[in-house]
């Protein structure tokens, strides 16, 4: 528990307890006081000090009354407490939750609050062992583990919303995500069993792939099972042809977690939406598919779900189905050296071997560093051929102060990954926004996310993921697009540098740029071109009198005759 040195938390908690004893009948107080002490015990003293004793007392009693009757599942209340109606008040909208204690609750609530564009001001989450009667009525707090069961009591305060429709949308959203949490948590043992079953079945019947590839795929699945993947959903599919069309049909009853079957749909909707050329990839004899889903996680961590597909083959080596797993890679997947992760270790080894550098040489070490620092989600998804092209391209770029673009298309045309290197000293948010807008336009995308990485290098790395409709992504000349990125990223200072080099030559031009380049204020840059600045710089250099004063007058091109 966070406490200040003067015991501020206890002062407030004792005051609330005293209010309970003075206001409630003895029988009610005997339940309310220990509830209040547990409820407030983990609240930061600063949060307590921002609230009156009346409002703390009201919040505790309100939640206790909400908790009194609970027969299982999760109950949620979203409201704006008013003094006249509820006996206490808050400047924020309040969320009260009671339910079985489960993993991922607080993280998932935060995801939904953020998704709705709200700020989370306070969250109180005591886990209490409560004793209830057969009808779910609260009797008392358990004295020990021999009675009752653990329940999560969650109090959340977010930006105030007064429209009933907004309050209902918040309640509906929270209900949805907590339903997902329950599905993922309750099905977790079955999903672990399913993953182990998939691992045991790899190679039976055998895949047409190379035995070494099959062994590496199995090792990767075993690595996932060793607490390196948060399992959130599983489902099996059968690949069938109907009327000349490929279809993925759900194996009835195979859905677990977030992939539980909830409706009448018996086929993969996402697969059905793919064009024929992408559907045909389902027949390729590649055992393992690793990609990102086009669905964001509602559980544990915000971000697009990781999709692991394991193909099923008949005795003739023909693809007959897929066993699908969705979830989230854990932090170890991002922090562990790729040489220690199955699949990644082989990609890295193949790229280094193909590059042909002498073992231990500077070039070999530089390439290994590039591969270790490569965006990890990309490293999982990219093919060895694309990785070789990109990694060696990055190595050739070195520390040169220029912009480079590397593009990778998702197998199912759901997104385009754009890896951009820019001079670190030139990078700014406005530059990134212009680049992002250009990439969305070029690939006819809908939205985009970005991630910026700074290291000791003179270059900054920007990863922009452009979300596409999922049918057909336009063909784009990457080098031409790179030139367009250079133009939109170009600053006034860059044009000044170029103008000085052209006018004065490289040596003197760089000398003058380093001397004056950063000295022109925003007002000047908005009004005058870099070529005019070159003229003014020459005037600066010409000043040699003891008074250090000179004047240059000219008529703007736009001036009237």
Image: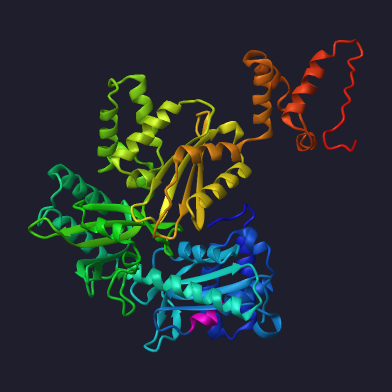
Q: Identify the residue shown where x is 34% and y is 59%.
A: 327
Residue drawn 33% across the image and 74% down it: 146
Q: Quadrant of residue 127?
A: bottom left
Q: Position of residue 193 (x, y in %)?
A: 21, 63
Report if residue 164 is visible in the image: yes
Direction front: furthest residue? 561
For the record, the magenta segment spans 63-68
Tell me if residue 264 comes above or below residue 111 in the rendering.
Answer: below
The image quadrant that residue 14 belongs to is bottom right
Instruction: From the viewer's side, name the closer residue of 211 and 155.
Output: 211
The quarter of the picture where residue 318 lies is bottom left
Task: Locate the C terminus and report the quarter of the image it occupies.
Answer: top right
Position above or below: 517 against 143: above
In-front residue for pair 318/126: 318
Q: Residue furthest left?
A: 315
The structure residue drawn at horizontal position 65% and vertical position 20%, both measured from the top left corner, is: 502
Mostly what secondary structure, the magenta segment?
helix
């Amino acid at each position: 528990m966070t406490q200040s040195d003067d015991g501020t938390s206890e002062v407030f908690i004792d005051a609330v307890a005293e209010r309970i004893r003075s206001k409630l009948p003895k029988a009610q107080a005997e339940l309310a006081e220990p509830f209040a002490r547990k409820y407030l015990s983990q609240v930061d003293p600063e949060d307590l000090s921002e609230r009156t004793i009346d409002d703390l007392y009201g919040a505790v009693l309100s939640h206790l009354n909400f908790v009194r009757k609970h027969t299982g599942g999760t109950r949620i209340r979203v409201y704006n407490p008013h003094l006249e109606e509820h006996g206490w008040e808050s400047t924020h909208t309040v969320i009260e939750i009671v339910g079985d204690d489960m993993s991922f609750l607080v993280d998932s609530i935060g995801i939904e609050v953020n998704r709705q564009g709200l700020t989370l001001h306070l969250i109180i989450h005591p886990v209490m062992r409560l004793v209830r009667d057969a009808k779910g009525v609260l009797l008392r707090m358990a004295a020990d583990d021999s009675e009752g069961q653990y329940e999560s009591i969650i109090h959340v305060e977010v930006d105030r919303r007064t429209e009933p429709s907004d309050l209902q949308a918040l309640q509906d959203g929270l209900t949805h995500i907590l339903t997902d949490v329950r599905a993922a948590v309750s099905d977790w043992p079955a999903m672990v069993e399913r993953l182990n079953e998939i691992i045991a079945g790899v190679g039976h019947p055998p895949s047409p792939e190379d035995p070494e590839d099959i062994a590496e795929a199995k090792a990767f699945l075993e690595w996932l099972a060793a607490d390196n993947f948060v399992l959130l959903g599983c489902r099996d599919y059968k690949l069938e042809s109907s009327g000349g069309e490929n279809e993925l049909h759900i194996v009835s009853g195979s859905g677990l977690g977030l992939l539980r079957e909830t409706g009448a749909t018996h086929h993969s909707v996402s697969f059905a939406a793919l064009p024929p050329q992408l559907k045909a990839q389902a027949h390729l004899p590649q055992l393992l598919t690793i990609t990102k889903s086009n669905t964001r996680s509602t559980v544990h961590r915000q971000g697009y779900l990781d999709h692991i597909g394991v193909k099923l083959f008949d005795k003739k080596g023909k693809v007959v189905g897929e066993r699908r797993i969705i979830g989230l890679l854990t932090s170890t997947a991002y922090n562990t050296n790729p040489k220690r992760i199955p699949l990644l270790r082989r990609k890295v080894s193949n790229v280094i071997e193909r590059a042909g550098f002498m073992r231990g040489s500077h070039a070999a070490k530089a390439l290994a560093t590039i591969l270790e620092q490569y965006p990890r989600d990309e490293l999982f998804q990219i093919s060895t051929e694309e990785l070789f092209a990109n990694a060696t391209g990055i190595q050739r770029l070195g520390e040169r102060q220029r912009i480079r673009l590397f593009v990778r298309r998702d197998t199912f045309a759901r997104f385009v990954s754009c890896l951009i290197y820019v001079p670190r000293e030139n990078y700014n948010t406005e530059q990134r926004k212009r680049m992002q807008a250009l990439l969305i336009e070029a690939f006819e995308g809908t939205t985009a996310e970005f991630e910026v990485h700074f290291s000791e290098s003179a270059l900054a790395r920007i990863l922009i993921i452009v979300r596409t409709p999922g049918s057909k992504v336009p063909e784009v000349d990457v080098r031409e697009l790179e030139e367009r990125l250079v133009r939109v990223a170009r600053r006034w200072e860059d044009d000044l540098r170029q103008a000085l080099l052209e006018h004065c030559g490289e040596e003197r031009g760089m000398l003058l740029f380093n001397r004056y380049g950063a000295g022109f204020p925003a007002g000047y840059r908005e009004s005058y071109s870099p070529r005019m600045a070159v003229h003014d710089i020459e005037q600066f250099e010409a000043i040699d009198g003891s008074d250090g004063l000179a004047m240059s007058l000219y008529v703007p091109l736009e001036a009237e005759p």
